[in-house]
Every structure is written in C-alpha cells, then in structure tokens.
Image (tube, grey):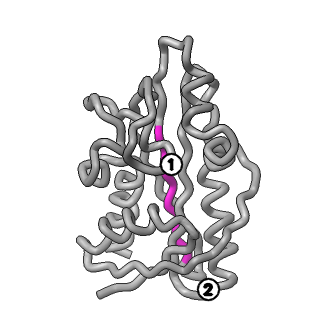
C-alpha cells in the first residue's frame, strides 16, 4: 500500500480525503501542522505555498488542501478568504449578507497540492450550487449552507453521499489519475 502524508490541522478534511484515497490503495497519515496561509486571490497559489512550507518540515511526499466558497453575487466572496470568513462571520453571517438576495449561486472549489520534494503539482475540483436559506444541523465548515446543483439538501445533510460528489473529491480524482501514472 502506498503512503502519503496529509499536512493539516483539519481533522474533518483528513477523514474525507482518507476515505477516498483508501479506495485506491493509498494510506493517508495526518501530520498536524498549522500551515501559514498567504494572502492571494488564487487557491492554487495558497495551496502550493502550503505544500512547500509543509515539505520543508516533513520531508516526505505529502498533500495539502485548500478550499474556497465563491458566492457569485458577492463577486466570489469569500473565495480564497473562506477560512477567515468562516472564523469571523460564520455561516450565519453569510446568510445575513444574502438574506435579501434572490441569486444565491455559488461554487465550492478545492485545490489539492502534492509535493514530493522534486516539484509541487496542483489539482483543482469544483462543484456549482447555491447557498441554502438555513443552516443545517449537520456538517462542518460551509457544508451546512451549500446545496450542490441537482440536490435539495446541503452537503451536511447529504452525509456520506457528499464524499461521492464534492469539490474535494473532484480534485482528488484528478490527483489520483495523475498519481497512478507518475
């Protein structure tokens, strides 16, 4: 079984990614690390920087992940600043901002950055959907308010089905396609 390190302190992301990678005979180990997050308008640049920082400490092949929720009517806010927005205004703040907006279209994007000490490669996945009218009682992060297209429930309410269709899974599928042939 192949082994990769996941550098993060986000246990929820780790569990989702581990569940997906085990299907491809890849064991994922968590290395708890507080990664610096540069300010950038591009998730790819943020994830790439995190992967370089993490490799300098861990010195083993690894992945990091960065996610952004891009709300179209808000000029893609919070986008790459999603973790800051979640920490400061939370899901209730997002719903307050959107309470009089009819257009609640959003894209949830994930970027996986792989670093093996030779190079950094990035892989992106996205799911289009909308921000729901309430905060679901299940899920973490923005999962309680994001409803993917074709569904009438939030990521949080979809349970294990979320892992099959998520933005993170889309990025992981692209990563796996590359990783299995490299």
**Frontmost residue, 116 versus 39:** 39
Q: Which residue is mark 2?
A: 58
Question: Looking at the image, is 120 positioned above or below residue 31?
Answer: above
Q: Earlier in the sequence, mark 1 or mark 2?
A: 2
Q: Residue at x 53, y 65 (%)?
A: 10
Q: Foreground mark, 1 or 2?
A: 1
Q: Is residue 62 visible?
A: yes
Q: Which residue is mark 1?
A: 141
Q: Does residue 95 appear to the left or right of 33 in the view shown?
A: left
Q: What's the mark number on residue 106?
A: none
Of helix, strand and loop, which one carries label 2? helix
Q: Which residues are magenta?
A: 108-115
Q: Does residue 122 appear to the left or right of 26 in the view shown?
A: right
Image-quadrant location for residue 20: bottom left
Image-quadrant location for residue 151: top left
**Frontmost residue, 101 versus 126:** 101
Q: Residue at x 55, y 37 (%)?
A: 91
Q: Residue at x 40, y 49 (%)?
A: 139
Q: Residue furthest right?
A: 39
Residue 41 percent location from the top left of the image: 69, 43
Work out which quarter of the rendered image holds the C terminus and state it.
bottom left
Question: Looking at the image, is 121 positioned above or below residue 152?
Answer: below
Residue 125 percent location from the top left of the image: 43, 48
Q: Is residue 121 visible?
A: no
Q: Residue at x 32, y 79 (%)?
A: 26
């Amino acid at each position: 079984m192949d082994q990769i390190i996941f550098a993060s302190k986000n246990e929820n992301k780790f569990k989702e990614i581990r569940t997906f990678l085990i299907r491809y005979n890849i064991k994922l180990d968590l290395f708890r690390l507080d990664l610096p997050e540069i300010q950038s308008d591009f998730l790819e640049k943020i994830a790439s920087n995190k992967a370089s920082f993490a490799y300098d400490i861990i010195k083993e092949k690894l992945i990091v992940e960065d996610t952004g929720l891009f709300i179209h009517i808000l000029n893609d806010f919070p986008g790459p600043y999603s973790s800051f927005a979640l920490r400061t205004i939370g899901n209730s703040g997002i719903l307050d901002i959107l309470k009089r907006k009819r257009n609640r279209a959003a894209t949830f994007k994930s970027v996986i950055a792989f670093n093996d000490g030779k190079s950094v490669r990035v892989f992106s996945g996205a799911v289009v959907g909308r921000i729901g009218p309430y905060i679901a009682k299940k899920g973490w992060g923005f999962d309680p308010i994001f409803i993917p297209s074709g569904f009438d429930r939030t990521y949080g309410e979809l349970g294990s089905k979320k892992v099959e269709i998520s933005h993170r899974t889309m990025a992981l599928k692209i990563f796996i396609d590359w990783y299995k042939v490299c």
